[in-house]
Image (tube, rainbow, N blue to C red):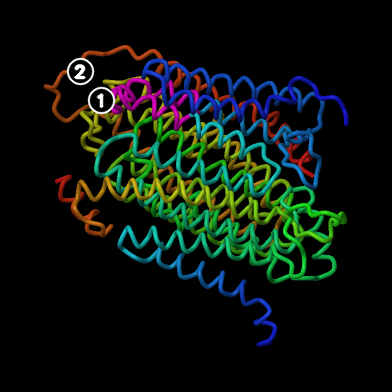
Amino acid sequence: MTTMLWWQNLPLFMIVGALICAAVCSVLRAKAARAVMTVLSALECAGMGILLYFTLTRNESFVFAMGEIGAPFGNELRVGAAEALVGLLFAGVMFLAVLGGWKQFTADIAPNRVNLYAAVFCLLTAAMAAMTFTNDLFTAYVFIEISTIAACALILSRNQGRTMLAAARYMIMNLLGSGLFLLGLSILYVLTGHLLFQQLGEAVRNLAAENRYPMPMYISFLLMTLGIAIKSALYPFHTWLPGAYSTATATSSAILSSVVSKMYIFLLVKIFFRAAGTDVFARRIEDVLFLYAMVGVIMGSLHAILQHHMMRMIAYSSVAQIGYIFLGISLGTEAGFAAALFHILAHSSAKSMLFLAGNKLRAAAGDRDTFPALRGAAKKTPLAALAFLVGALSLVGVPVLGGFASKVYLAKAAVELGGWRMVLLLADLLVSTALNVGYMLRTVLTLYRPAEEPGTEPAPKTKDAPFAFAMGALIVINICLGVFASPVMDWIQQGIAMFV
Amino acid sequence: MLSQAYGHLDGLTAVMLFGIGFALLLLDKNLMKKIIGFSMMDSGIYLFLASYGYIESRLAPIYQEGVTEASAYINPLPAGLVLTGIVVGVSVTAVMLGLTVRLYERYHSLDIDEIAEKIRREGK
């Protein structure tokens, strides 16, 4: 056994530390609990950053065997550049979401329940870190369920009838998803006898080479894919999404839209790449996934156009954006996976900003988010409107911003592949970009238009330093993803090379 | 064909249980029945894991005097997975039940469509 370096212990500490924080938070006072949750998410960022630095400079991934029990018996964590990069963004978004929703958080959540919210937040942080790092399919399932419960509690943060119904719908759909995932996992385990990705991948390849159990294997991967598709709201399974995202408090909706659904997708990428063997079983599933994703991109945008409420519109645009990510995955090539991972980064940073800014704008417009009510909101909260503008432009795909780069990479990956998928994907990108322009720019124009009743003076400006910091940081991240797209892409490709 | 199916009787039962539970969770309007459906769905999976985890004529994975070779015992892992799954299932059920209680206290109904209708009227 080679000696461990100090930073190779970080993944475990990040997971266990977050779990301990969750337990501690539940008995703390409101103020202390809030401090713990903020510091924890900042520390997770730092940890991910350190892991990213070391995995990139050493250009190799490492495996952390729990209790030093080696494969095939033990439980493992595995960290490479891709895991660290995606994890860094998730942790960063969670940190900024806490800051950006600071003020609304105080208004929405009763002081005697803040500690419970903080506990759930820490639990979700643990689930995020664990799902990003785990090398074991069943551990992934356990943390899927933990994150489902935590996300449900995050939705419930506002004590209203609407949020309760949204949470119930969220739970029902997500339980269906995790049930399918568990069944798929069980079938795969019965067939191969392994749960660690590395051994699982080898067993699957061996069985495929001997052509044993092709059908059960196919069904098991299909069930797992379907489960994750439901949980991450791929188009026809998106019904739980708009209610859940648009009614929760700002911090919750930012985290739900850009971390929770994305970590399931990252898990799917790991399963496809490391367990299913992209060349064996994933291929047939990808064709199905491709069609769903394509329909999803268009339908999500159409739904978004039809909405009368801004928050619901942003929520539906997530459906379309998740379609993009699945398009990348369903190409089945390395370039496609890289484009999908890049879009996870670009979309997470843009969508969390949209939700945070959107909540601010809604508050400025007197807690209404219909389009007429939002007219002139930009004057009341210029920073929120600016952030909304940047986020909207990024999702539309304006150059210099992250969304543009990810669309270019997606198109490149499709052109490399050629054939019918290329034609369909390019057409799809074109149509959806046009639709995106339609609904995003309509909202932006509404925000900057003068209000209908000029008599009403804007509310006295209140300072909100954490929000300003979060918006500033997110705008910088969005621009950096666009400007430095090619180095980020190099990191992703380095990370994917480490997968195998 | 039929004898082949008979060999997988446990598996077939498990998948049937899963299917019934899945349909109940997805289609029934009553929140309580949805939760029952979830429990059935999970039980189906536990049965699946437990039945394939057991190999006939082997010993339970507890050490017995004189029997040292590993192949005499069954693999303890599937049972471990079932146990973990049960714990997860219990906590999820608890959350769902809590949510249902709160919805019922507020809207005096278990029918999810009726609750949605009441909330819509409340909003106006």
Query: Which numbered dot is residue A448?
Result: none
Question: What range is drawn magenta here?
Answer: A94-121
Q: Residue at x 62, y 36 (%)?
A: A130
- Tag 2: residue type? Ala
- Residue A466's image quarter? top left
Q: Residue at x 23, y 28 (%)?
A: A365
Which of the two labelled residues, at mark 2 and mark 1, occupies the earlier sequence position? Answer: 1
Residue labelled with disc 1: A364
- Residue B116's image quarter? bottom left
* The one of B124 and A158 positioned closer to us in this rendering: A158
Q: CA distance from mark 2 to mark 1?
A: 8 Å
- Tag 1: residue type? Ala
- Judge if badges 2 and 1 mark residues of a common chain: yes
Q: Is residue A429 above or below residue B51?
A: above
Secondary structure, mark 2, is loop
Q: Is residue B29 visible?
A: yes
Q: Single out the residue that lies furthest toward the front.
A: B65
* The one of A1 and A379 positioned closer to us in this rendering: A1
Q: Residue at x 69, y 52 (%)?
A: A272
Q: Is residue A290 above or below residue A213?
A: above
Marks 2/1 in contact by CB < 8 Å: the verdict is yes
Q: Is residue A358 above or below residue A412?
A: above
Counting from the top left corner in percent of width and height, residue A437 is at 42, 42
Chain to which mark 1 belongs: A
Magenta highlight: main SS: helix
Residue labelled with disc 2: A459
Counting from the top left corner in percent of width and height, residue A428 is at 53, 54
Counting from the top left corner in percent of width and height, residue B47 is at 58, 65
Secondary structure, mark 1, is helix
- On the rendered structure, is A458 left or right of A52? left
